[in-house]
Image: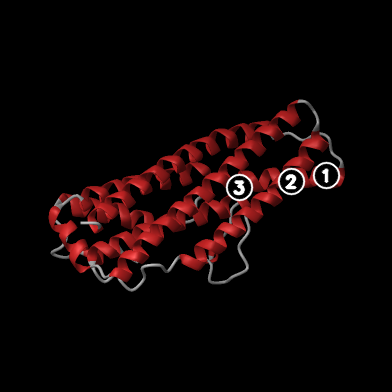
Amino acid sequence: MALQHTRSRSFPCGSQEAAIIKVGESLLSESTPSSLSSVSNRIKGLQNLYGSIDDLLLLPHIQRSIAHECSEKCVDEMMEGYIMLLDACAAAKDVVSLAKRDAQELLSGVRRRMHAEAASTYLSSRRKLRKMVQKASFTMRKKQNLGKGYETRPVEKLLMDAKSATLGMISSLFFYMTGTKTHSSGSLVAKIMESKKVEETDFSKVDAALMSFMQNGDDDVKFDDVLKSMECSIQIVEDGLECLFRRLIKTRVVLLNILSH
């Protein structure tokens, strides 16, 4: 879904349009993240994209276009789509928050040489995290097509592209953290990961080390550096998701103001 096809008289000419298109193209063409830092960069890119969209929505002729050309059904689905994005972002924040807490508790347990107890608690919480991801992914799949069919108009298409980029980032984050696909072949995660080689992540390294420890009883579990790095990276992602959540709320408010006049 390329943003270069969204040019229209409804868009302003010049650098603003080019900047929005460039950011959107970059985000939509992103491959599966290979680290939490790359996830963080994608989140920052989305923040910039929604900031550019907000600037665009403040232009009088864009506001007139949305207010006069959007049908009632289009408006309802657009608003419901933003609620879905906020729910997905909130779910991602919850998952990341749980992962951060798990990493902190595991690191504390390893330092106190309570390996067995810490490992058991961590792996149990990881199962809970995977269930949270499955539930959130199911909800995203069920509502990902909201607003589809209205994207022939430039502004609506840009909003749909931004939504797709956001859901794609969240799905990639979920996959990176769990290393598992949902069962539906049509899911966002499955589509993103289709035909791609899955690299080992910090999460999968820790999982593998703990499983080995639980099975073999090797008390020499050493991944302090990995856990410290994970904790810092997770915090950055968590902060980024919070900023993105606030940005999504702002964009939704701007749209509501336009549509209420």
Circles 1 and 2, Cβ within 8 Å, touching? The answer is yes
Residue 201: image tag:
3
Q: Secondary structure at mark 1?
A: helix
Q: Which residue is mark 1?
A: 214
Sequence-first disc among 1 and 2: 2
Q: Establish if 167 lies above or below 111.
A: below
Q: Give neighbour class at mark 1: few <14, some 14-19, many 20+ (Cα, 10 Å).
A: some
Image point (21%, 62%), residue name: 66
Q: Establish if 149 lies above or below 27.
A: below
The residue type indicated by label 3 comes to Thr
Q: Establish if 108 lies above or below 48.
A: above
Image point (21%, 52%), residue name: 56
State the CA–CA distance, disc 1 to disc 3: 20 Å
In this image, 62 relative to 245: left or right? left
Circles 2 and 3, Cβ within 8 Å, touching? The answer is no
State the CA–CA distance, disc 1 to disc 2: 10 Å
Q: Which residue is mark 2?
A: 123
In this rendered view, identify the residue nearer to me: 168 or 219. 168
x and y percentages locating residue 200 in the rendered image: 62, 50
Work out which residue is located at the far front of the displayed protein and give it.
260
In this image, 172 relative to 72: left or right? right
The quarter of the image holding the C terminus is bottom left
The residue type indicated by label 2 comes to Leu
Q: Quadrant of residue 226?
A: top right
Image point (62%, 55%), residue name: 179
